[in-house]
Image (cartoon, coloured by chain):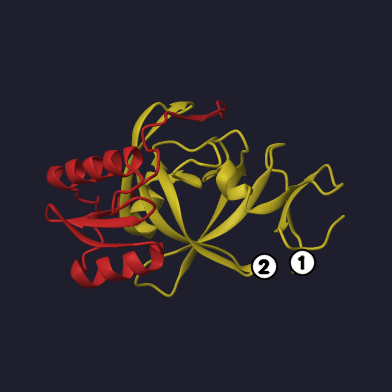
């Protein structure tokens, strides 16, 4: 099994807070953007995922650390998956 | 751009993708169930893949996604570069890691991904295919 990604709890909390803010307030600076988070801080934000991932790679080269969210996305859903034959 | 078709797998629609492995010249081929019933067009993911494939291929972690139905609970999503070489398609794609893909498949291509293309059997009942939205009409 490849090594797991290590997402710090403070990064998860910040991601959730930014997601809530962007979804409830269209004037949020993060609304409609991808936001890179590591070490409890926002590392980069932008409209193109490729640019944000590149900025994240420069700031935090280890791909197993930190996370990038789509700030205005509905992560909470729930999103239904109808495939039941497993 | 030409249409690409695949034979049905276990009688179900399938597509084959390539996963780019970060820091490696290699790609991994994976067979996915083409499932328009997987998520909405506004879902924060385009595919569901075995968690192990996500750990190997992801360039970075994304958010936790809450799923219901066949997979229930919160699952980590990831950014993975996905290619369909015969369609000249390559894109950073948000993929949810799941513990157990559908039997006979490596994962699921969700509606949001399929909806990037024209999709269907294109008059061949034993095939499933994709073609670019700007491609030729039937």
In depth, the one of A60 and B51 nearer the eye is A60
At horizontal 87% and vertical 55% (from top left) the residue drawn is: B138
Give the x, y percent position of residue B62.
32, 50
At horizontal 33% and vertical 37% (from top left) the residue drawn is: A24
Q: Would you say residue B124 is visible in this rendering?
A: yes
Q: Residue furthest front?
A: A27
Quadrant where the image shows the N terminus of chain B: bottom right
At horizontal 39% and vertical 56% (from top left) the residue drawn is: B79
Q: Which residue is mark 1?
A: B2
The chain containing the residue under callout 2 comes to B
Q: Which residue is mark 2?
A: B86
Under circle 2, the secondary element is helix
Discs 2, 1 touching: Cβ within 8 Å: yes
At horizontal 41% and vertical 64% (from top left) the residue drawn is: A48
B28 relative position to A29: left or right: right
Give the x, y percent position of residue A78.
42, 28
Q: Are marks 2 and 1 on the same chain?
A: yes
Give the x, y percent position of residue B69.
48, 24
In depth, the one of B45 and B98 nearer the eye is B45
Q: For mark 2, does the 10 Å Cα neighbourhood hold few (<14), some (14 to 19), or many (20 or more) residues?
A: few
Q: Which chain is red?
A: A
Q: Would you say residue A65 is visible in this rendering?
A: no
Q: Residue furthest bottom?
A: B25
* Colour chain B appears in: yellow
Under circle 1, the secondary element is loop
Give the numbered dot on residue A13: none
């Amino acid at each position: 099994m490849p090594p797991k990604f290590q997402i710090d709890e403070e990064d998860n909390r910040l991601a959730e807070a930014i997601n809530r803010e962007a979804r409830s307030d269209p004037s949020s600076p993060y609304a409609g953007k991808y936001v890179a988070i590591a070490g409890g801080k926002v590392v980069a934000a932008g409209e193109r995922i490729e640019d944000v991932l590149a900025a994240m790679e420069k700031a935090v080269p280890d791909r197993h650390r930190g996370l990038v969210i789509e700030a205005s996305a509905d992560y909470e859903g729930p999103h239904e998956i109808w495939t039941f034959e497993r | 751009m030409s249409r690409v078709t695949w034979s049905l797998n276990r009688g179900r629609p399938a597509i084959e993708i390539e996963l780019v492995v970060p820091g490696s010249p290699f790609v991994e081929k994976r067979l996915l169930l083409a499932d328009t019933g997987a998520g909405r067009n506004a879902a924060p993911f385009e595919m569901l893949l075995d968690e192990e494939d996500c750990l190997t291929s992801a360039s970075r972690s994304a958010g936790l996604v809450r799923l219901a139905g066949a997979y229930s609970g919160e699952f980590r999503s990831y950014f993975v570069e996905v290619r369909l070489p015969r369609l000249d398609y390559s894109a950073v794609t948000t993929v949810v890691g799941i513990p157990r893909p559908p039997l006979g498949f490596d994962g699921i291509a969700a509606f949001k991904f399929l909806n990037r293309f024209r999709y269907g059997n294109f008059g061949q009942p034993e095939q499933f295919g994709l073609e670019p939205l700007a491609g030729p009409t039937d």
